[in-house]
Amino acid sequence: MSISYRVDEAIAHIRFNRPEKLNALTLAMYEELGQAFVRAHEDPEVRVVLLGGNGDRAFCVGADLGESIPALAEGRFDISEWDGAHIKQAGFHKPVVAAINGLCLGGGFEIMLAADIRVAADTAVFALPEAALGFVPAGGTLVRLVRQIPFALAMELMLTAERFPAARLAEMGLLNRVVAPDQLESAALEYARAIAGKGQVAVSVIKEAALTLGHLSLDEAFRREAILGQRAFTCDEAKEGLRRFSRAQKNSSSRQ
């Protein structure tokens, strides 16, 4: 499979698996990737997705220029058919951690923008080259990028089509951590395990709120926040958390 999938310790490990082609995405890979995210979304055992690329040269260089891009240019299908691979579907509220090695270009960059936590090797290189080729990064980037970083920085990335080192992406606020290549997998896994250990409902509600409240008026956003908060406060995980806290407080008091 060009997209590998396995679940371990409540973490769905999804990896681009075409290293000989720098993990360039064929039409079949876009379909496989979308199905992998659906599989993770529907599996109650999965709490977090950890996304990475096999090989040491690339996370993903985006759509295959010999197949996928010509298919788009010829109008054989609409780019919205890749929405699943770009995690555009409503209701996907499980956190995604991305481990980025090597080249992260075009569609690979766009998929990274769908991740909630991003860890990159200090050798990673990033670019949105679409404008230089005469098209646009329409796999979520035209919507996401200007919402994630300041306008001028987003425009610099999209309009210049230049390559940027990981350190610069971190300065822009697009990366959580930059580490040595040999520390990449362990650092990303550390994030995934930490999130997997938190309340599943709470984590889901936090992501849903982050994705859905920003465009609302303040009054409507606060109203919706209260509804989401109530869902978390009244769930079984919250009740158990309060019981653990109460027991810990009693034990602490008895030792004093």
Image: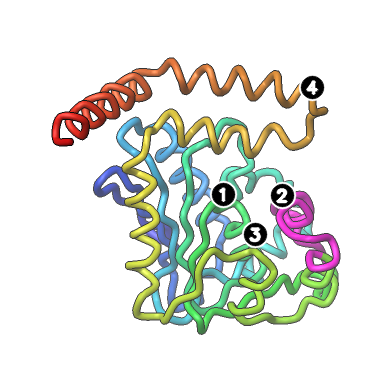
Principal secondary structure, stretch drawn in magenta:
helix
What SS does tag 2 mark?
A: helix
- Above or below, 113 against 236 in this view is below
**Hey, which quadrant is residue 106 in on the image?**
bottom right
2 or 4: mark nearer the eye: 4
Taking 62 as reference, is 37 left or right? Answer: left
Which circle marks residue 135 in the picture?
A: none
Three-letter amino acid code at the position of disc 2: Ile
What SS does tag 1 mark?
A: loop
Comparing 132 with 251, the one in front is: 251
Residue sitting at the far front:
256
- Above or below, 191 against 35 in this view is below
> Is residue 136 inside the magenta stretch?
yes
Report if residue 97 is visible in the image: yes
Report if residue 77 is visible in the image: no
2 or 3: mark nearer the eye: 3
**Hey, which quadrant is residue 19 in on the image?**
bottom left
Q: Which residues are magenta?
A: 135-154
Q: Which residue is mark 4?
A: 219
1 or 4: mark nearer the eye: 4
Q: Which residue is mark 1?
A: 85
Which circle marks residue 110 in the picture?
A: 3
First-in-chain label (2 vs 4): 2
Screen quadrant of the N terminus: bottom left
Three-letter amino acid code at the position of disc 4: Asp
Q: Residue visible at 85% across and 71% down?
A: 159
Alpha carbon separation for disc pair 2 and 3: 13 Å
Three-letter amino acid code at the position of disc 1: Ala
Q: Residue visible at 78% across and 58% down?
A: 74
Alpha carbon separation for disc pair 2 and 4: 35 Å
Q: Which residue is mark 2?
A: 79
First-in-chain label (1 vs 4): 1
